[in-house]
Amino acid sequence: MKLQYDKPASVWTEGLPIGNGRLGGMIFGGVEQEKISLNEDTLWSGYPTDGNNPGAKEVLPKVRKLIQEKRYQEADTLTREMQGPYTQSYLPFGDLLLRFEHGGIHHSYKRTLDIEQALHSVEYQVGNVTYKREMFASNPHQVMVLHLTASVQGKLHVHAALDSPLRHTLHVKEDRFVLSGTAPEHVDPSYVASDDPIRYGEPGAGKGMIFEGQLAVTAEDGQVIVDSQGIHLLGATAATFYFSAATSFNGYANMPEGEGRGVTAMNGSRLNMATAQPYTSLRDAHISDYRSLFDRVKLQLGTPLAPEGMSTSQRITTYAAEDPGLVELLFHYGRYLLISSSRPGTQAANLQGIWNALTRPPWSSNYTLNINTEMNYWPAEVCNLAECHMPLLDLIGNLAEKGAETAKVNYGTRGWTAHHNSDLWAHTAPVGNYGDGDPSWAYWPMGGVWLTQHLWEHYAFNRDEAYLRTTAYPIMKQAALFALDWLIDDGSGNWTTAPSTSPEHKFRTAEGVAAVSSGSTMDISLIWELFTNCMEAADRLGTDMEFREELKSARERLQPLQVGKYGQLQEWSEDFEDEDTYHRHTSHLVGIYPGRQLSEEETPEWFAAARTSLERRGDESTGWSLGWRVALWSRFRDGNRSLRLLSNMLRLVQDGDTEQYNHGGVYANLLGAHPPFQIDGNFAASAGIAEMLVQSHLSYLELLPALPDSWQKGYVSGLRARGGFEVSIWWDRGQLAEAQITSMLGTDCVLRSDVPLIVTSNGTRLDAIRINASTLKFPTSAGQTYSISVEGDQ
């Protein structure tokens, strides 16, 4: 399971990513000159600030009055007065630069990323000498490791240095080369025209993040010289470089300067531990740690079409999703990227995971809460990577704390809220620089409401009641309190939201386009999901029954969803015309995926209307949006359409292509292309493929709900289902052959199937309870595996 190429990367989006959750590297694989772009997940601009806007509380009733009077453009304008500052930006650490004295003339070049072992390798020949490099980011040892060998003794002559686009100094500390730097106190978003976009504090008195990287080497032979220019390795045959990085970040509420951590001591300790061990020990520990997560899921969709040696970029352009092996690679690559960018104790994966080379990255490489951050974690539970979900759950806890002040100051409500964007400092206020931002994206107070869905999902998969009681439910309840206070009567007895936007989309009126109205379908659906989750949590915990009834009553009064003139699920409370029929956001369909509000069985009219809405959006969009649509079509049980969207995703985008909103795909390194690069498309693809094979969002588990016609034979093992189940499935001729369901918790298992199923345990057939013509239920014991087969196929 490899990404492979026959030449070095010429641009960043051809490089190959490695990461240990905290440290990230994008490796170019050059011959004479090697460049590894470095990141550390806490290296952001800024420091803790209060971005709340007390004036918003006075503006709010005025905006609501304009909305009630259908003066939408005026409401847009006035909503700008409710904004706060922009978030800060995720920053590049710098580069590890290697210069080899053998020149650039070479042959027999190979560059690979083995995602089964999380190892990057480069191999080539200069004359008759074979040079090899192997690199990984170790989670157990918290360092990057680069191992170099030459097939002929004494042929390694390498000069290694560090550099950074941020303010820094270089010096030698004993036998190590050290880069010390300070991050800016503020960076303007990439879309803001500014004469002074990157601002540092006064030398010696600034408030920005302190960061440091240390580089060390051990060599089997040859000579090592460390000076102000770097580390020089002369006449060696094998050597290992080690890189450690740290920042002074000490929590979202603490100043990184003054209250920060000591970076030099952290780096020194990590390098001392790493350099004391043989390379093989570091490598083995890394692979063992990584595979403990990656090996949980296996997937086989058919015979690969691409020849064994074909480069990944050529494979994309030649076959796209017609090659089942490439779809498998895309699926596992998303899992690889999540393991590599999100581990317990690290920061949540941002808009680019942990990989960024720009001081002003696209959209600040921040946390975009109206879809992208949530999308990053859609595969976490179903793809058996629950541990990798933890950084987002931790971030939600931080946002809940800071968002309580935003709810109080900006709106005078209980509970907590978050808006369109956030950052390392747990920003929860509306962005827009106090009036510069377009409300279509700068004003959206549903961020906290949506994020709490992840808290519930983590519980739904593992049923950890202690986690629900002490962590998830208290945060969910506070978000529900905000929603209760935020809802207003629409004049006809229904609860609605105002001001409300359907993120980043606008509607047409006789006066022109506008973004702000009342009761967008996304608002109503997200609140429905939150209230439902809180009600179920209260039932499971046997607590808060009075509050549960309050939520039930409020849910019953929520503004009903509506079907518009085209038969579509309306995106807004009124049947407005879309500004863009093919808009990249499908926000009004959150009740289909990732939610559970709408289903063919429970809400057939709205379910059909939602399908019409998705039809109207079309099959062309940005890379991340195509990933979302894969999952949506899976929920509609249309595997052929999901596969068509995957084929559109597997469309090669060249670096430098201008930002597009209707023609995304992937770069040569298989990373999602909006364009530009956003990692959420990769995660959505993995989640969508899993959704084609197993679904459990309703009251039952369904096997192969959206299997494409072309996936005639295959298997998947290790996917997770809600209720505490692990699922493996084999199919042949497009039909279920056998499944194995392992019960982790001993809960009852409910299966939906259009064909009669037989359940056996240890060879004995169980008397399953038939609920209806398509649903059966059977009891389970924790740790027991149950075999499922089609009746009559025995």
Image (cartoon, helix red, strand yellow):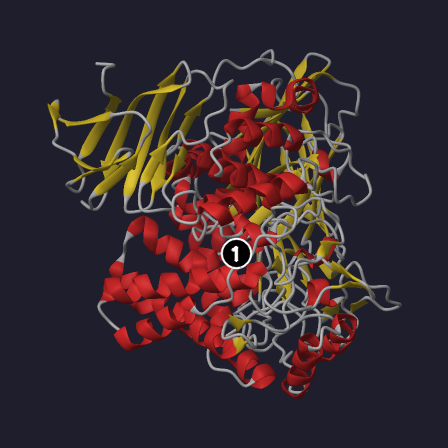
- Residue 597 percent across, percent down from the top left: 44, 53
Residue at the spot x=89%, y=68% of the render?
195
The reply to whether residue 143 is in sight is yes
Q: Quadrant of the C terminus?
A: top left
Camera-side residue of 778 and 602: 602
- Residue 370 percent across, percent down from the top left: 60, 59
Q: Is residue 429 left or right of residue 337?
A: right
Quadrant position of residue 32: top right
Q: Is residue 452 left or right of residue 417?
A: left
- Residue 445 percent across, percent down from the top left: 59, 70
Q: Amino acid at mark 1?
A: Ala
Which residue is identified by label 1? Answer: 348
Circle 1 residues within 10 Å: few <14, some 14–19, many ≥20:
many
Camera-side residue of 23 and 365: 365
Number of numbered markers: 1
Residue at the spot x=72%, y=47% of the render?
581
Residue at the spot x=77%, y=36% of the render?
11
